[in-house]
Amino acid sequence: MKFLTNLDLNKNELQNARIQNLAAPPNNPLSGQAYYNTKDNIAYIFDGTTWRNLFSMSIEEVITLLNKSNYKIDDDNLSNNVNDAVIKRHEHINASILNVITQELINKWNLAEVNAKSYADKQINDYKIRPATKNTLGGIKVGANLSINEDGTLNANDNSVNYIVKQEKFVASEGQTLFSLTKGSYKVGLGALSIFMYGAKISNDAFNETTEKSFTMKNPLNVGDIVLAEYIELVNVTPYPIHGKEHLSGGVDPIPKATTYTEGLMSKEDKNKLDSISIGANKVIRSDKNGMILIDGLEQNVYIHPNDINTRHVTDDEKNVWNAKETTLGSQDKANRAETNAEAYTDNKATDILSNANKYTDNKVAALVNSAPEALDTLQELAKALGNDPNFSSTILNKLGLKLEKVAFTIGDGKTTEFTLKHNLNTSDTTWSIREASTGEGIFTDVITVDTNAIKVLFAQAPAKEQFRVVVNG
């Protein structure tokens, strides 16, 4: 049984009671709610934020209370004892020995640090890088054809027509589009720059060659995107090797398109035409002569009508449709036969329906009389049985009106705690019951009689939508 309102014991004792026993804290607790944990055998109370042990306090809670208190705890000379122990930490028979050992350890540590630094410096000064070979890494001498930039980049310029391919890796920030090169430069407009993202080369249409030391992505990148720029840096190259696209239409060195008589590049329009022709297809064109076509250059006689909008072929399907059409005489004959059949069918059905209705009525009357007891098988006998009361129905209704009346309500909207229910029983002598609408479980809560036609139901917390069923008896 549930109580949905506060229970006031009017200062009477609550005897032989126990709080709720659970293996875990209840859901959605309220401040002041308590339960007994059956796993750790500890009673807890909810303080609005956490469940607290009802009968003990943590060290932090004790310290907090002490700090808030106006009372002081006598330390029983604790502070003096602690200070004395600190002062006398080496005041024993071996104090001098301990001090000597401590100082010797400090001296050895300092000496070891000096020796280690000296040894490391000597190793660095004496170390020599062995020359590189074909099979092992090592030092490379800078000769006449080699140079090293300030950033440590090694440049080779053995002849005047070399160039260097360089790579730079970038990690994009959110929305970044502009990237600046730091290790070299490239010639803008010659296709010397390639961009890779996550190991795959992207189309040149996806970026712009902004300057010789930068490029711009056309779409903003996401944070963490990996971008690899590979570019060709000129090293005294004149002229620079032209990329293949410069030989296309619009390039600096375009190849002419092929014609009927000369070789050249194929246009994209011609390529689309070729792709649309099936392998092994014949070339068919219309001949200038009526009824003739050219197949692979040979005239073939295929008869066609002259251009005449009033003359054309009729297909087999069109002929079948035409032959299947009904004639006027045939349609009239079918209509006459349908009318005759309908009249005959209607007459037969009407006769059957009338016969069945007569039989049904006779059977019902016979059943009404024959199934009644002998003392009530006539209307006169029925009238006597009803007390010859011409207002029998009103009399019965008035008798029923004297029976106990009841009115039922379903209440709850999730926000209201008081509900005024108008039962209109015109009496203050009413009783009521309240139960869970879903389970039928009875509950207790406050109920106040407002007047002879209404009561008020009160809850400590707003019930959920249509949670309770209230029945008022009058």
Image (tube, rainbow, N blue to C red):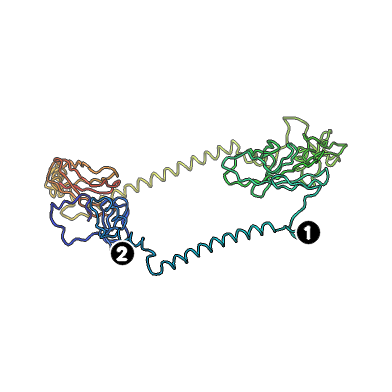
Against 432, residue 268 (above or below) is above
Task: Name which residue type carries label 2.
Answer: Asp
Q: Are there few (<14), some (14-19), or many (20+) residues within 10 Å of tag 1?
A: few
The location of residue 72, given as percent across then percent down, is 24, 54
Q: Quadrant of the N terminus?
A: bottom left
Q: CA distance from mark 2 to mark 1?
A: 74 Å
The location of residue 194, given as percent across then percent down, is 70, 43
Q: Which residue is mark 2?
A: 40
> Which residue does the image show at 48% across and 43% down from the upper left?
341
Camera-nearest residue between 354 and 180: 180
> Which residue does the image show at 31% across and 47% down from the upper left?
358
Given the current orientation, which residue lies at the most extreme bottom position? Answer: 93
Camera-nearest residue between 463 and 369: 463
Given the current orientation, which residue lies at the most extreme right position? Answer: 261
Which image quadrant is residue 420 in?
Answer: top left
> Which residue does the image show at 52% across and 62% down from the upper left?
107
The location of residue 40, given as percent across then percent down, is 31, 64
Q: Can residue 269 be seen from the camera position used here?
A: yes
Q: Can residue 363 be seen from the camera position used here?
A: no
Left or right of 295 on screen, residue 182: left
Task: Name which residue type carries label 1.
Answer: Lys
State if disc 1 and disc 2 touch (CB < 8 Å): no
Of helix, strand and loop, which one carries label 2?
A: loop
Left or right of 424 on screen, residue 148: right
The location of residue 257, given as percent across then percent down, is 82, 36
Left or right of 198 on screen, residue 58: left
Camera-nearest residue between 433 and 322: 433
Of helix, strand and loop, which one carries label 1?
A: loop
The mark found on residue 134 in the picture is 1
Q: Earlier in the sequence, mark 2 or mark 1?
A: 2
The mark found on residue 342 in the picture is none
Q: Are there few (<14), some (14-19), or many (20+) residues within 10 Å of tag 2?
A: few
